[in-house]
Amino acid sequence: MINAVRSGGNPISRLKDFPAAANESGVRAGPAMSPSWRALLAAACLAFVRPLAADVFVHEDIIVDPSPSRLSVCHGFSCTIVTQVDLTPAQWAEVSAPLAAARSGPEAERAQIALAIARFEQVVGTIAGTAGDMPENRPGSDWRAQMDCIDESTNTTTYLRILQRAGLLRWHRVVDRVTRGFFLFGMPHTTAVVSENAGGRRWAVDSWFYANGEPPVIVPLETWRQVRWRPEAPARAARTP
């Protein structure tokens, strides 16, 4: 795995022990295991782990109690690269701005959540080098900038936790990620999830379908769980700030 620490867009230090990345089953991802196979294996492991325990991330150095000044960003397929990011006050103000406005209820807040996640991706993309992330698993010019659903769901959960800890989620709370499909029933796919405070209805917050900086799709989890479900809007090109 490659680990980088960056502050306000400037690298502080860089440690490399690639390709010694391990997935949740303990299988080490060496040169013979391509990023796409690492993604499938990680998603499959998530499918088995989910009913037994709380949300389990692919690598132990992913920050599970993130803040604007201390968060981790996964990229390179299944968190092969984990970049530690420190947002400046100005950057935090930019990503949190969509949720600063008053909202009338859960539906309005979900729209603001989508905008905030898009802002996070735009700001973090310039810091972590992921601004060129393409929709879904489409190859880009640099594999290190690309994200599969493990990367996307991990990062979106991180951003949502930061917003929640800042008191900016009033109608929802962040819950464990969910994985659908398991090869015979469709390719495994994982999403971040929020739950309505009133009633507990869960909503998928899925950034994987679109390019970096585009608002994620937010749909009822029961809709998203349909193995072949995908958003009607076509994927768009990667966006940079």
Image (spheres, grey):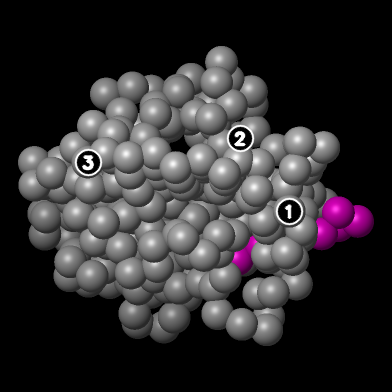
User: Which mark is first along the chain, 1 or 3?
Assistant: 3
Q: CA distance from mark 3 to mark 1?
A: 29 Å
Count residues near mark 1 (Cα–Cα under 10 Å), then give few for <14, some for 14-19, many for 20+. Answer: some
SS of the residue under disc 3 = strand
Residue drawn at point x = 35 percent, y = 73 percent: 173
Whichever of labels 2 and 1 marks the residue nearer the N terminus, that label is 1
Q: Amino acid at mark 2?
A: Glu
Residue type at mark 1 is Arg
Q: Circles 2 and 3: CB distance less than 8 Å?
A: no
Q: Which mark is residue 200?
A: none
Within the image, what quadrant is residue 161 found in?
Answer: bottom left
Q: Which residue is mark 2?
A: 136
Foreground residue among 14 and 195: 14
Q: Secondary structure at mark 1?
A: strand
Q: Which residues are magenta?
A: 177-185
User: Looking at the image, which residue sits at the far top?
Assistant: 141
Inspect this view and state whether residue 145 appears: yes
Quickly name the residue at label 1: 28
Which mark is nearer the camera, 2 or 3?
3
User: Is 223 or 182 nearer to us in this picture?
Assistant: 182
Which element is circle 2 on?
loop
Alpha carbon distance from label 2 to label 1: 24 Å
Q: Quadrant of the C terminus?
A: top left
- Residue 7 is marked as 3
Side of 217 relative to 122 (left or right): right
- Whether residue 231 is visible here, answered yes or no, is no
Identified at 82% across, 52% down, the residue is 186
